[in-house]
Amino acid sequence: MRWILASSLVLAFLSGQTVTGQTTSVASPGAAAPSGATFKSGVDLVTVSAVVRDHKGRVVTDLTQKDFELLDSGERRPITEFRADRAAVSVALLFDGSGSMQVAAKIEEARQAARHVLAWLQVGRDELAVYSFDTALHQLQPFATYSNNAQLEQSLVGIAPFGMTSLNDAIAATAKELATRPNAHRAVIVLTDGMDNHSSLSPAEVSGIASSIDVPVYILAVVSPLDHVGAASAVNSARPVPVGDLTDLAHWTGGEFFVTSIPAQTSIAARQIVDELRHQYLFAFEPSSRPGWRPLEVRAHRGQQLVVRARSGYFAGQPRTTSFEAASR
């Protein structure tokens, strides 16, 4: 029901503009409408990227097309194209630079988390852009082939926490930017304390936007050990991380949500994110002829309990023009 209520707002956002300058209002991102990656075909196809894990949490990498079942609004649809190769990745690193990150050295913890993510990217092969946000979205590094140089480190160190937090709006705007890139193995990786006090979009609306353009969102919330719910060091916090909303936001896009308070947790989360992106399954199907929001469910069957994460839906009737051959590199 939340998807239906939010659909008109999501369509309005997607038909808006994307980020064109170095700094822009998060609520009104720039120029070209995003296009989801598709396979080349005589008809317009919808692509879906999916991550599969077994009952022990291990990434499953050896499934075939016949192991998958795709349900579009409850109706089974044939998978017309399928890819399962290890691939280069495109990452939009979204860094929380709002005032709340000054508390308990969270800004430095987020920088360390960014370095953990970067350590798993492949120089000369993967693609990276870096953004930060407070009430506005700031492009620190444009999309380019990854190179771990001094300019990149300077961008991270130069983020000075200030202002209120438009977390939801920034995620939506960054996802729209990433959707214009040709690589289908892609994700927005958010480094934040999880607080939001200035967004116009709700988590459900953001997940609808990112899901409709097949951009997974991974959220890595860096918190003090005292605020890490469930940890031995935790105490009652006056500002707990909104775990439920952020978990739903990430999962509905096919991504994941992590809370970390020590370097070992951050390292494990960073490796898991990049490993999942490299081993995404990509497949395509013919969309419904009925326009509007279409819920998706992806299942994997192969004699064991498998967990599939993929985007939760798409908008039928939306143009998709990017070729899959270019996207998969």
Image (cartoon, grey):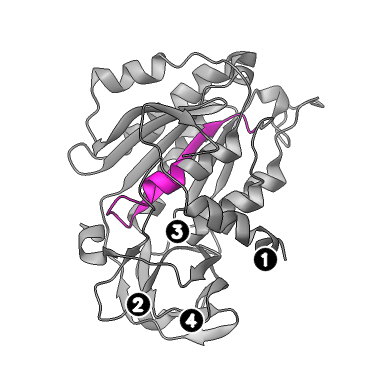
Image quarter where the N terminus lies is bottom right
Is label 1 in a helix, a strand or a loop? helix
Residue 65, quarter of picture: bottom left
Q: Does the magenta-highlighted stretch encompass residue 122?
A: no
Distance Cα–Cα, label 2 vs label 3: 24 Å
Residue 14, x across and y down, in percent: 48, 53
Is label 3 in a helix, a strand or a loop? loop
Q: Earlier in the sequence, mark 4 or mark 2?
A: 2
Horizontal arrangement in the rendering, residue 236 relative to residue 311 (left or right): right
Residue 155 seen anywhere in this rendered image of the structure? yes
Q: Does the magenta-highlighted stretch encompass residue 177?
A: yes
Is label 2 in a helix, a strand or a loop? loop
Q: Earlier in the sequence, mark 1 or mark 3?
A: 1
Amino acid type, callout 3: Ile
**Residue that numbered label 2 is attached to:** 64
Q: Earlier in the sequence, mark 2 or mark 3?
A: 2
Distance Cα–Cα, label 1 vs label 4: 17 Å
Q: Residue at x 51, y 39 (%)?
A: 28
Q: Tell me if mark 1 has few (under 14), some (14-19) or many (20+) residues whose alpha carbon lies within 10 angstroms of its own.
A: few
Boundaries of the magenta span: 174-194
- Camera-side mark, 1 or 3: 1
Distance Cα–Cα, label 1 vs label 3: 17 Å
Residue 81, x across and y down, in percent: 31, 77
Q: Earlier in the sequence, mark 4 or mark 3?
A: 3
Q: Residue at x 36, y 42 (%)?
A: 91
